[in-house]
Image (tube, rainbow, N blue to C red):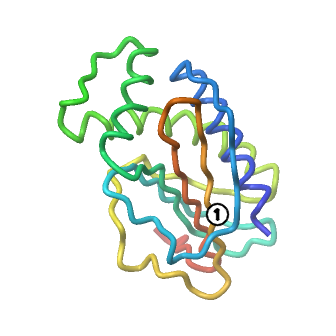
Amino acid sequence: MYFPCAELLGRHAAKVFELMSGLAPDRLEISEADESEGPRFPLGVRVDFKGTTDSKKPLAGFFVCAFENSRAAGDIAAAIAAKLGVGFSLDAEQTGVENVLGEFLNVVIGLTCSDWAEHGLTTEFDPPQPLIVHEGDRKPSGSECYHLTLSAAGHPPVTIFLVFLPGEADLSA
């Protein structure tokens, strides 16, 4: 049901990745995933969202831009920082990587939010935050999870997990 939304997120991520890093993506793979596959990575950035479907059913979820190791995250963050003219060191604290990836995701969110609305999902996104695996992330019945892999030649892949949690949104907040 939510696959077209996963495709939109993936296409925007690829477009923004190329603009912000100068690296041309040579592959974008999107597949349905099992909750047990992730997101369990040592470094990444998470974005939570909530809203409603076109039939006014509550919806919540999150997506994670993650890497298998800190060196991989640093490689991509350094490319983005160089293109943006921002100082960055691979030896810098983890927060430097997270800040650069957060800027990348802020642009992706802006493009994705309006396109999701055209597909019947009215959503509000939280700001990107350091990756934390929340206890409540166990996949309830009716959830859908997608695994997106974005690759550029000679660089480690960017992994994105997108999880939709139908009926989980608390719209009173």
- 82 vs 18, left or right, is left
Q: Where is residue 134 drawn, in percent x and y?
A: 36, 72
The residue carrying pointer 1 sits among few (fewer than 14), some (14 to 19) or many (20 or more) residues within 10 Å by Cα, namely many
Q: Residue furthest bottom?
A: 141
Q: Secondary structure at mark 1?
A: strand
* Residue at position x 43%, y 32% in the image: 76
Identify residue for label 1: 146
* Residue at position x 75%, y 71% in the image: 56
Asked if residue 75 is positioned above or below residue 44 in the image, the reply reads above
Asked if residue 172 is positioned above or below residue 16 in the image, the reply reads below
* Residue at position x 79%, y 56% in the image: 4
- Classify residue 50 by image quadrant: bottom right
Count of numbered labels shown in the rendering = 1
- Identified by mark 1, the residue type is Tyr
Q: Where is residue 81 drawn, in percent x and y?
A: 38, 21
Q: Residue furthest front?
A: 154
Asked if residue 95 is positioned above or below residue 38 in the image, the reply reads above
Q: Nearer the viewer, residue 19 or 118?
A: 19
Q: Residue furthest top?
A: 85
- Classify residue 17 by image quadrant: top right
Q: Where is residue 40 drawn, in percent x and y?
A: 39, 65
* Residue at position x 43%, y 47% in the image: 127
Q: Where is residue 1 drawn, in percent x and y?
A: 80, 69
- 49 vs 12, left or right, is left
